[in-house]
Image (cartoon, grey):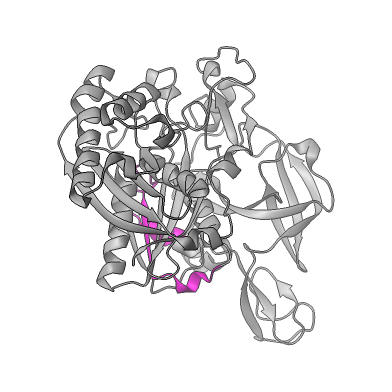
């Protein structure tokens, strides 16, 4: 039996009220969408979702990582390899990126399923993540949100068995983004829905149900991709799905998360599923794809992860639309991106364990933890007597901090602190926390974020956030 053994999700805590788009005044409690802040992107969201999925497991047991996204920051550099390092996976793990389509998330799930079924991998981590942008003030901007979902696919302790899939491939120019274009574009709404989305999603869903010999009322939940709320409701009506079978698409709370949209809904459905429930997941993009899952008894024994509902309850509202534009680099900038080579690739390679995996060292003689790695213990002076230890999975406490009003950020000041991590002192930024809430002794957990961009590429490190 092959299927999902664990799952997790990540939704940025920042919310942009829909009414605030274009600079309008927003009313409290109105519809909103989740937006990645200036230090987040598809990779950092993916790392967060992957950590939530793998919490309590040994990451060294993962044999493969498939990353699905349409907004990977690099065109010629594998994101999955970077994510694998940040998650502390084995060096011989098989990594692959899947992109170019909004149904990349379900394609990645199918790829992992096939690998486990074929016996080439015992467990494969699938992460779907997207941070799409629409042109400021456009109709598309109100519907797009940012988020990620992660699933561990294997054959042991399966909580949701994969029963089958069906794919429809088609050519249509309805939603697209060019190579040098930061914004997603959409053709006229009626054309997108009537000629692309609605018939293809219906075809994929009905073909899968027929292939498996099921009936529509056999499914407890339908997690359907849709470009917007109206299209989603129309597809559900056309399929004849009862309201209680529809998984909430979260328009007005999260938004359309692109390649992660259907996977995020699947993660949300698993949070409330019972043994025996069937879930049908369908995604769209140059065709459509549908997968069928059956929830097993093992789902009841899984400790609840940090899932979609946990993240939706953890939120902060953007102060203004202009601040949101600044976080995306869409406003005037005092410090434009550097055009030089940026961070030395040699230094990046040499220090990748420190910076990407956030790995320190523990002395075999005195058990003291130190960061960064060094040849001599600063406590007992033993030489070359160290074992690696991952600091990203520990918690720290603020020893001292300061407010930096010069470091480029859309929401100054940047909080810079010295954090004690079980004896190791680390200079680190504090994120997702108002400056007035920072205090000495404050407990922090660690998140993978962008620090800055130079040489036309992002540079990553770890930041501290208040411990949940």
- Determine whether 168 is above or below 467 in the image: above
Q: Is residue 464 left or right of residue 298?
A: right
Q: As rendered, which of 52 and 403 lies closer to the eye?
A: 52
Quadrant including the N terminus: bottom left
Q: Residue at x 53, y 43 (%)?
A: 308
Q: As rendered, which of 20 and 419 lies closer to the eye?
A: 20
Q: As rendered, which of 353 and 225 lies closer to the eye?
A: 225
Q: Residue at x 45, y 49 (%)?
A: 149
First to last magenta residue range: 57-83
Image coordinates for residue 217, horizontal then vertical, percent: 32, 40
Q: As rendered, which of 453 and 321 lies closer to the eye?
A: 321
Q: Quadrant of residue 13?
A: top right
Q: Residue at x 28, y 66 (%)?
A: 115
Q: Is residue 59 left or right of residue 364?
A: left
Image coordinates for residue 122, horizontal then vertical, percent: 37, 72
Q: Quadrant of residue 113?
A: bottom left
> Is-magenta flag for residue 230?
no
Q: Is residue 98 visible?
A: no
Q: Is residue 240 visible?
A: yes
Q: Residue at x 65, y 82 (%)?
A: 386
- Determine whether 55 is above or below 33 in the image: below
């Amino acid at each position: 039996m092959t299927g999902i053994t664990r799952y997790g999700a990540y939704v940025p805590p920042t919310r942009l009220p829909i009414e605030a788009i274009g600079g309008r005044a927003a009313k409290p409690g109105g519809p909103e969408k989740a937006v990645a802040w200036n230090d987040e992107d598809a990779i950092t969201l993916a790392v967060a979702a992957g950590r939530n999925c793998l919490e309590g497991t040994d990451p060294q047991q993962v044999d493969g990582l498939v990353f699905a996204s349409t907004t990977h920051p690099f065109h010629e550099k594998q994101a999955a390899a970077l994510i694998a390092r940040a998650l502390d996976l084995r060096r011989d793990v098989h990594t692959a990126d899947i992109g170019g389509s909004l149904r990349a998330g379900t394609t990645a799930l199918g790829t992992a399923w096939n690998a486990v079924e074929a016996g080439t991998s015992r467990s494969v981590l699938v992460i779907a993540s997207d941070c799409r942008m629409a042109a400021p003030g456009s109709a598309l901007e109100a519907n797009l949100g940012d988020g990620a979902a992660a699933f561990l696919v294997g054959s042991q302790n399966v909580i949701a068995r994969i029963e089958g899939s069906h794919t429809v491939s088609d050519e249509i120019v309805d939603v697209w983004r060019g190579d040098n274009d930061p914004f997603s574009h959409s053709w006229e709404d009626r054309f997108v829905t009537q000629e692309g989305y609605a018939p293809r999603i219906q075809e994929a869903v009905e073909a899968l149900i027929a292939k498996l010999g099921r009936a529509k009322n056999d499914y407890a939940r339908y997690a359907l991709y849709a470009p917007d709320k109206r299209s989603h409701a129309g597809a559900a009506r056309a399929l004849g799905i009862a309201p209680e079978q529809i998984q909430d698409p979260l328009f007005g709370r999260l938004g359309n998360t692109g390649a992660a949209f259907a996977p995020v809904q699947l993660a949300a459905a698993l949070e409330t599923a019972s043994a025996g429930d069937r879930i049908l997941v369908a995604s769209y993009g140059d065709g459509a794809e549908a997968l069928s899952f059956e929830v097993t008894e093992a789902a009841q024994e899984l400790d609840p992860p940090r899932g979609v509902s946990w993240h939706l309850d953890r939120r902060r509202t953007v102060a203004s639309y202009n601040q949101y534009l600044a976080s995306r680099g869409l406003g005037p900038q005092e410090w434009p991106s550097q055009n030089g080579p940026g961070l030395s690739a040699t230094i990046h390679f040499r220090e990748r364990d420190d910076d990407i995996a956030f790995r320190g060292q523990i002395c075999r003689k005195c058990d003291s933890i130190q960061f960064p790695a060094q040849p001599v213990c600063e406590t007992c002076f033993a030489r070359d007597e160290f074992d690696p230890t991952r600091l990203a999975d520990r918690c720290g406490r603020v020893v001292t901090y300061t407010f930096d009003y010069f470091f480029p950020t859309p929401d100054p000041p940047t909080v810079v602190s010295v954090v004690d991590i079980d004896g190791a002192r680390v200079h680190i930024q504090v994120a997702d926390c108002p400056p007035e809430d920072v205090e000495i002794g404050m407990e922090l957990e660690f998140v993978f974020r962008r620090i800055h961009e130079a040489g036309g590429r992002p540079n990553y490190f770890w930041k501290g956030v208040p411990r949940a």
